[in-house]
Amino acid sequence: MMGKLTLDELRALRERAQQTIARRQTAEGAAGEIIVGMGTCGIAAGAREALDALVETLNQHHRGDIVVRQTGCMGLCFSEPTVEVRVTGMPPTIYGRVTAEVARRIVEEHVIGGRLVDDHVYDRPATDLAPHLRAPGK
Amino acid sequence: MPYSQFVLVCAGTACDSCQSREIYSRLTAAVRSQGLEGRVQVVRTGCFGFCAQGPVVKVLPDETFYVQVRPEDAGEIVAEHLAKGRPVKRLLYGGAGRAAIADIPFYQKQFRIVLRNCGVIDPENIEEYIAREGYEALATVLTSMTPEDVIEQVRISGLRGRGGAGYPTWKKWTFTKNADSDVKYVICNADEGDPGAYMDRSTLEGDPHSVLEAMAIAGYAVGAHQGYIYIRAEYPLAIHRLEVALRQARELGLLGRDILGTGFDFDVELRLGAGAFVCGEETALIASIEGHRGMPVPRPPYPAVRGLWGRPTVINNVETLANIPVIILKGGAWFASIGTETSKGTKVFALTGKVNNSGLIEVPMGTTLREIIFDIGGGIKGGKRFKAAQTGGPSGGVIPESFLDTPIDYESLAKLGSIMGSGGLIVMDEDDCIVDVNKFYLEFTVDESCGKCAPCRIGGRTMFNLLTDITEGRGTVGHIEQIHTVAHAMQKASLCGLGQTAPNPVLSSLTYFGEEYRVHIKEKRCPSGRCRALVTYTILADKCIGCTLCARRCPVNCIRGERRQPHVIDLSRCIKCGECFKACKFGAVQRS
Ligand SMILES: Cc1cc2nc3c(=O)[nH]c(=O)nc-3n(C[C@H](O)[C@H](O)[C@H](O)COP(=O)(O)O)c2cc1C
Ligand code: SF4
Ligand code: SF4
């Protein structure tokens, strides 16, 4: 990692990080990401098993272009483990009650087949505030 | 073959009753008859948290949100919207009324300030936090605001403490700022001991930097250079994420010496607590950090002027702090535009108990319990009847059905005899016994009392014994009088909030569910069947068809009877678990 930041460097780092995320989510070639909710509740409900199954199935299909990442709790504790899928050509989707079996279906049906996995789709609970937090002067 | 459009139909438990199955099949049929089945996929989804407007249908990728959809509307949605690309205007959600939060469109019931990054960013990667304007509030504060400016924005925001008491944050900060001392401290209270509460844990696990950034801002505002996070050792994942976050923030010079080259120094250390409820009380917490036993001491002096190692100390809750960066970036006035007259912003709740969609939710202050439980929460599990909601845990109280429409804020909850508390929200249904629930809370406070002062130590035990008598059939009218006397003494004479508030749940339940106590005492009967000493299970011979189901379910094998012959319970061995009562499909098992 880089050394201590100055103010300008913080803002430059923000630009770069935003671009990296945008690229990861949309650009051709980098086909997308799968984000697993790894809070205490998610892990207790089997998020690690889901994560393992995602990675394994992606490997089987040689989909190294899909990044698997972790995040905290989305708040949908009744439907843990939860997983968000963002891949080119599909709307960002949140899945709940993702067992290892559902995780495999997510890779095969959603990522590869371009179909949503019926009966496991959930809605994001709230509007994202971050785009409305633009730094002053921007 | 990939699809290009998706129709999501809410199939949550609550919407099910209102025809979503029918809508799903009509949509599927219409898609087929229009020849769109290669292009459009119809999908069933979990609850949208919008049940009052249900059934809900959402079309992706264009994010069209249809509400109160009827099965007859399916054809039009497919023919117009999916085939011709013309959304069906009359079914669109207008977002009337609630869409007014400053410049942000929000159609959901929830609004996330504290949880803005939870479930979005990788909490172990500081760059993802920075990408979402992380540390920009700290940068703004250090480069273009005076400490007075910062406190002024917090004052305008109306932010009040989320740890339970609701004290205005700007006042605390001002006391510490004005206190004369060359060394001051900022403490983040992450002890979170209420049963059923896990808001702070989730916030720290999902977005640790927001709290670190806020602590540095608080440090700048009050003139402190050292912060401590007091967190219980039972939260290993949150601790791990905080350690990673601290390391990354120090590496980038966002904590430590000369932050962002501005000359301001601030660092944070973790202090692990052993998980005693009383250690969440601020003076006990300070004693614990200093290496003493976690016991409260009388206030004043308040920690804001004489706290850690005798120095002025700001103590704030995790959730209080997580609001701070947003208040700085959006301005205090923006924050104050959300919520009610006296309570601004949002509140995070851990919604648990007999509700379908349990989870961590964040809503604007002033949202009603009905919206929380029946819309976001999707209603009561198994179609049972709502009985009461408990807020504020062992210091709070119950809220009955008649007050479900009260917009909740600090004042309205206090008026109902409960408190906002830290955010535990436990839903009870008709199967819960109010006396039994209160016995549970008292057992908790008796266990957790530090024992330093008599009113709490002896009073709590006495109250617990009184309730036990009532649940075991030894209750008299005198018991209720005695509860009131002991409660009064505890409230008046206990040293800290634990003892002062311990009687609250019982008192509030006596107000709203006095009849249930009376039935326990006078009729020696527990209507919900929870108090085992007060119930007997018998099998009505004329209703029993001898299906043997109950006998097979009974864990102690105390039901006898031949197939097709009436069965009999051996009461001397019955442990009153109620399994037979639940199992019998013919109503032959009687609970009395
Ligand atoms: C018995 C008892 C337990 C408490 N537990 C907590 C706790 O777990 N977390 C917390 O933030 N505040 C807790 N408090 C409240 C704290 O004493 C203090 O008021 C709070 O941390 C102040 O932060 P705030 O102004 O941001 O709410 C507790 C109080 C009492 C009396
Ligand atoms: S009220 Fe209870 S917890 Fe508080 S100091 Fe007294 S004995 Fe200890
Ligand atoms: S209540 Fe439980 S123990 Fe008693 S008879 Fe029924 S199943 Fe058996």
Image (tube, grey):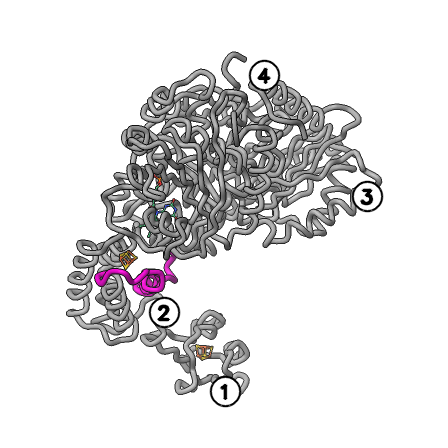
* Distance Cα–Cα, label 4 vs label 1: 83 Å
Numbered disc in front, either 4 or 1: 4
Q: Which residues are magenta?
A: B428-455
Q: Which mark is residue B529?
A: 2
* Distance Cα–Cα, label 4 vs label 3: 40 Å
From the top left corner, tell me how far across and down residue B2 is, in percent: 76, 33
Q: Residue at x 25, y 44 (%)?
A: B414
In this rendering, would B170 be left or right of B328?
A: left
Mark 3 CB near ligand 1 (8 Å cut): no
Residue A49 visible within the image: yes
Q: Amino acid at mark 2?
A: Gly
Q: How packed is label 2: few (under 14 Cα within 10 Å), some, or many (20 or more)? A: many
Q: Which residue is mark 3?
A: A59
Q: Which residue is mark 1?
A: B561
B147 part of magenta stretch? no
Query: Dividing the image into 4 quarters, which one contains the N terminus of chain B?
Result: top right
Mark 1 CB near ligand 3 (8 Å cut): no
Q: Are marks 1 and 2 in contact (CB under 8 Å)?
A: no
Badge 4: chain ID? A
